[in-house]
Image: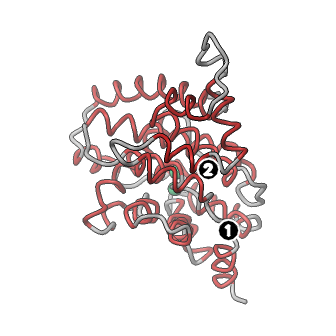
């Protein structure tokens, strides 16, 4: 098997995205969703149910009495917090699986993904963009999922890729493509396809380093993920060498009509929001 065939085979071997979470997201996307319908979906998964109750009864919320019914917990948490809990629970398992190549920053990759999701939501609110929050959180959280697959193939070539980037000759993505035949964005798109995600999410993941190449109808989401990705790298949630070579950033800022003062505000909002989300997702914001 050629290297490229091996990489495609590895995409096929990726575990499926949890059905329960995917179905719950569909319900949460409706403006007036039915709580009982959502509870019926969630209760099938004992681990998910336990996590929801655990979060609801955690010190973070400081409720005066213990909540033991899933329905009550779902109502109390509401759509935004439930989405964060469910998606980050599923994504953390995918990002944190032991991997070889990028293993030096397996943890960093997860923190980076979560930060990107938070930043994308903050930008959406600031600019009042009309994109569904589920889409944004999912696409941003999973934008680098291709690295999970590529890492196994990167291990012995990582130094070569890193050198290409550090010498300023290539962006991280270009170097990957040159050495492996694929870049992580492309592979991420293939994984999202395998998971039957909507085309907008597939496109946002596949084009998160070159949103201008995304099909027009999904471009705004791809641009949002790209911008969020760049901004979190700037505030210290990068992943090693990947952050060194972001292209087209100024163009994105211009397109989104964001100026220096907006960026300062976004970063402040991000920091508060990131702390909250880390509490909900059960990770340290470090
Ligand atoms: Fe990336
Ligand atoms: Fe990224």
Q: Nearer the viewer, residue 30 or 284?
A: 30
Above or below, 266 relative to 105: above
Does mark 2 have its CB less than 8 Å from ligand 2? Answer: no
Disc 2, SS? helix
Q: Residue at 67% across / 52% down in the picture?
A: 95
Q: Which residue is mark 2?
A: 91
Q: Quick one: label 2, few (<14), some, or many (20+) residues within 10 Å?
A: some
Task: Answer above or below: position of 126 versus 6.
Answer: above
Give the position of the N terminus as an image quadrant: bottom right
Identify the residue position indicated by label 1 in the image.
14
Report helix, strand or loop for mark 1: loop
Measured Cα–Cα span from mark 2 to mark 1: 13 Å
Any part of residue 233 in sight: no
Q: Residue at x 48, y 50 (%)?
A: 25
As drawn, the residue found furthest toward the front would be 36
Tag 1: Cα neighbours inside 10 Å, few (<14), some, or many (≥20)?
some
- The outermost residue toward the top is 64
Quarter location, residue 65: top right
Tell me where residue 131 appears, x and y as whole percent: 30, 48
- Measured along the vertical axis of the image, is residue 180 above or below residue 172? below
């Amino acid at each position: 098997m050629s290297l490229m065939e091996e990489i495609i085979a590895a995409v096929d071997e990726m575990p499926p995205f949890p059905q329960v979470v995917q179905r719950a997201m569909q319900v949460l996307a409706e403006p007036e969703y039915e709580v009982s319908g959502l509870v019926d979906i969630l209760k099938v998964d004992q681990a998910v149910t336990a996590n929801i109750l655990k979060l609801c009864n955690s010190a973070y919320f400081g409720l005066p009495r213990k909540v033991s019914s899933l329905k009550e917990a779902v109502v109390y948490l509401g759509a935004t917090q439930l989405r964060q809990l469910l998606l980050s629970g599923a994504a953390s398992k995918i990002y944190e699986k032991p991997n070889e190549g990028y293993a030096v920053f397996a943890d960093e990759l997860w923190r980076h993904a979560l930060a990107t999701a938070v930043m994308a939501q903050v930008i959406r609110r600031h600019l009042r963009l009309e994109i569904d929050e589920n889409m944004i959180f999912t696409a941003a959280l999973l934008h680098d999922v291709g690295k999970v697959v590529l890492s196994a193939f990167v291990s012995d070539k990582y130094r070569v890729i890193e050198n290409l980037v550090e010498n300023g000759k290539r962006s991280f993505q270009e170097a990957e493509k040159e050495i492996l035949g694929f870049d992580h964005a492309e592979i991420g798109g293939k994984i999202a396809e395998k998971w039957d995600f909507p085309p907008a999410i597939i496109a946002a993941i596949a084009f998160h380093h070159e949103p201008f190449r995304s099909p027009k109808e999904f471009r705004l989401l791809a641009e949002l993920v790209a911008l969020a990705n760049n901004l979190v790298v700037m505030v210290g949630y990068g992943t090693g060498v990947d952050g060194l070579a972001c292209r087209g950033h100024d163009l994105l800022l211009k397109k989104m009509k964001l100026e220096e003062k907006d960026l300062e505000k976004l970063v402040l909002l991000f920091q508060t929001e990131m702390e909250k989300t880390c509490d909900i997702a059960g990770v340290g914001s470090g």
